[in-house]
Each structure stands twice: as C-alpha cells, then as structure tokens.
Amino acid sequence: MDGQSWTWIATICLPVFAVHLVAVALNKAIQSYSRSRLEELTEARGRPARAEEIDRLDVRTGRAAEALGFMTGLFLATAAGLVLDRQQTLTDDVLTVLAIAALGVGGYLSAGVVGRHYAESILDRLWPATGFVRLAGLPLNAAEVAARYRRRFWLAHNLSRPRLLVPYLIVLLGSNFVVTGAGRIGWAIIQCSMIYLILSYTTHRRLQPWCPWCRGGDGGREHTPSDPLPDDRRQLV
C-alpha cells in the first residue's frame, strides 16, 4: 500500500478506534460500578446529584454504549478486510493480520480492564458526554424505528435455530465452489446476504427493549388464554 492510502486509513480508522475503546470502557464501567462508591466520589467532587442520574440512566446508557461499540467494531473489521485485500505478498498479509489482531484484541482487553477497575471515576468523568452516546446508540423515536424492523428482529431470533442456520451455512459455504459466470453472480448475492444478517443483529442489539419477540416471544401476537387449571383448596383427609 502506498503512503496516501495509509494516511486515509489512519485519518478515518484511528478516531473510530478511539470511539470504540471509549464505548467498551464505558460499557464495562456501567456493568461494574458500585453505587455507594459512586455516591462517595461524586459527593467528594461536589456533584452529588450525578450519582442519582447515573443510576437512573445506566441501563439505557450501557445498551447504547454496547451498540456503539458493536457498530464501530464492525466498521473496523470491514476496514481491516479492505487493508488485507490491498496487500501484495503473503508476508504482508501475515504481518498485517498480526498487527491488526494485536491492536484490536489488546485495545479491547485494555479498555475492559480500565473500565472495570476505574468504573466510578470513568462514569463521573465521561457522564457529560454520554448524552451523545445515547443519541448515537439509540434513536429518540426508538419505538417507531423498531416498528419498521420486525423482519430484522425475526431474523435475529430465528436464524440461530438449526433448521434455518444449517441450510443457510450449507448454501453460503457451497457457493464458494461455484466457478461459472452465472454462478459467480449467485455467489455475490449469497455473500451479500451476510450484510443484511449483520444489520439484523446490529439492529436487534440497539433496539432490543422494543423487540416484540423479546417482549412476547412470538412477535407480539396475542394468544387466547387457555383454561385455568382447577383450583381445589379443600384439604384431603
């Protein structure tokens, strides 16, 4: 790769990677923080009301941070694939894979450790900016947006079932052995289905509280209640 390509990659990917690490650390901090230690810290720093606000919005903020981390991670994985595609030799491929793996895994683990060990301080310092995280991770009209994505919710819930997953994997892997011209078009279409699958899982992670399958188990359809079991409270003698 030439110097100009590396410049564009650094300009775009480094800020996304930084946002990814912050989202991971914030999510881990929300999962690990202690309410009592947070109250002591915020009171010592002269903002005792912040602990109550964090406690009130921690679930929503954690879900938004998780969704933001997932989306930025997906972007970085795509960028890594593009970088690998532009390498010229096998040695370059191996070195690039090792560098990406070390940076990605090391950064993720480090952000998680920092988020757990400094949970209260991270929440107190980053809390003024978490409004942007909630806005990026969850839309303001989340219920209306979720109503338009029932198909994605259904796919996220049902594709993990063996009766759907196994045939899909067979077709997906088998398409790689098609070498004819028309077959390559079919291969491209089948491969593109993975993009929709990833979008479905991303949407489900962002909007899970409004997923009808998570709430009702069957897409929100109503059931006719079954007859109640007989209730005989008489004592046997």
Image: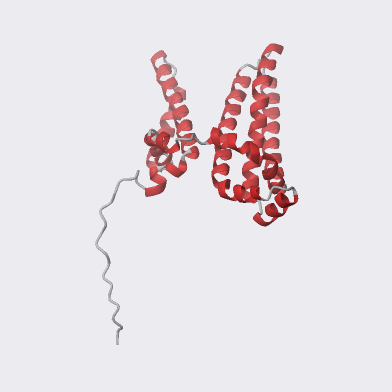
Task: Identify the residue at the far bottom of this view.
Answer: 237
| x then y, percent, for residue 179 | 44, 17
Q: In front: 228, or 140?
A: 140
In the rendered image, residue 170, in percent from the top left (x then y), is placed at 42, 33
Asked whether residue 154 is in view, the answer is: yes
Q: Quadrant of residue 200?
A: top left
Task: Give the colour scheme shown.
Answer: secondary structure
Left or right of 158, for residue 128: right
Locate the C terminus and report the quarter of the image it occupies: bottom left
Q: Is residue 235 left or right of residue 58?
A: left
Answer yes or no: is residue 2 visible: no
In percent of width and height, residue 67 lies at 54, 37
97 up-or-down from 134: above or below: above
Q: Nearer the viewer, residue 186 or 204?
A: 204
Q: Is residue 201 above or below residue 33?
A: above
Q: Which image quarter: residue 12? A: top right
Residue located 60% across and 23% down the image: 79
- Tell how many labels: 0
Query: Which residue sits at x=42%, y=22%?
Result: 189
Counting from the top left corner in percent of width and height, residue 175 is at 43, 25
Q: State the residue at coordinates (49%, 34%).
A: 139
